[in-house]
Image (cartoon, rainbow, N blue to C red):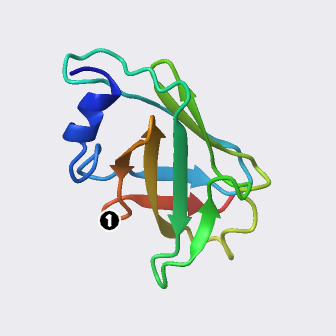
Amino acid sequence: MAGFADLVVAAQPALVGGGCRAEVTENCTYSRTFNVYDNAGTAVDLTGATITCTVRSKVDGSPVLVSGSPMITGTPTTTGFTLTASATTMSNLVTGTTAVEYAWACSLTLSGQTVQAWYPENSPFVIRSN
């Protein structure tokens, strides 16, 4: 077994079990690349995968940024995936000068199989005022 099939087994309950922290600045473009490796240490080609990412309020769970709405864009690569959000998307998410902490989750779907990259628990998405 190799490639994405390795991830399906390894990602129980999530590929990044300890969570994934993001720190971003309001009104600025966000971009982050994630390299993904199978059990043999070989980069996983995610070409054709659907990357779904959601940022939610830690207070009531309501969505703040959602993939394709048109908020966070997940782009599969031959070695993993990249998440991006435009400066426009990242605007008006902070009131005043105090940073706001949301929670986020990300999943990868390829050939009908879904891997949870990380869950919102222990995955803060911190937006700082600029």
Q: Nearer the viewer, residue 18 or 113?
A: 113
Q: How many marks?
A: 1
Q: Nearer the viewer, residue 126 or 69?
A: 69
Quadrant in the picture for residue 35? top left
Quadrant in the picture for residue 119? bottom left
Q: Does 11 appear above or below 98?
A: above
Residue visible at 24% across and 51% down in the picture: 18
Residue visible at 45% across and 42% down in the picture: 108
Kindly identify which residue carries mark 1. 121
Task: Give the farthest residue toward the right.
Answer: 88
In the image, is 2 to the left or to the right of 57? left
Instruction: Classify 10 Å Cα crowding around label 1: few (below 14), some (14-19), many (20 and above).
Output: some
Q: Amino acid at mark 1?
A: Glu
Q: Position of residue 61 (x, y in %)?
A: 48, 78
In the image, is 24 to the left or to the right of 11? right
Q: Position of residue 81 (x, y in %)?
A: 51, 31
Residue visible at 31% across and 53% down in the picture: 19
Q: Position of residue 84 (x, y in %)?
A: 63, 41
In the image, is 122 to the left or to the right of 82? left
Q: Position of residue 60 (x, y in %)?
A: 49, 85
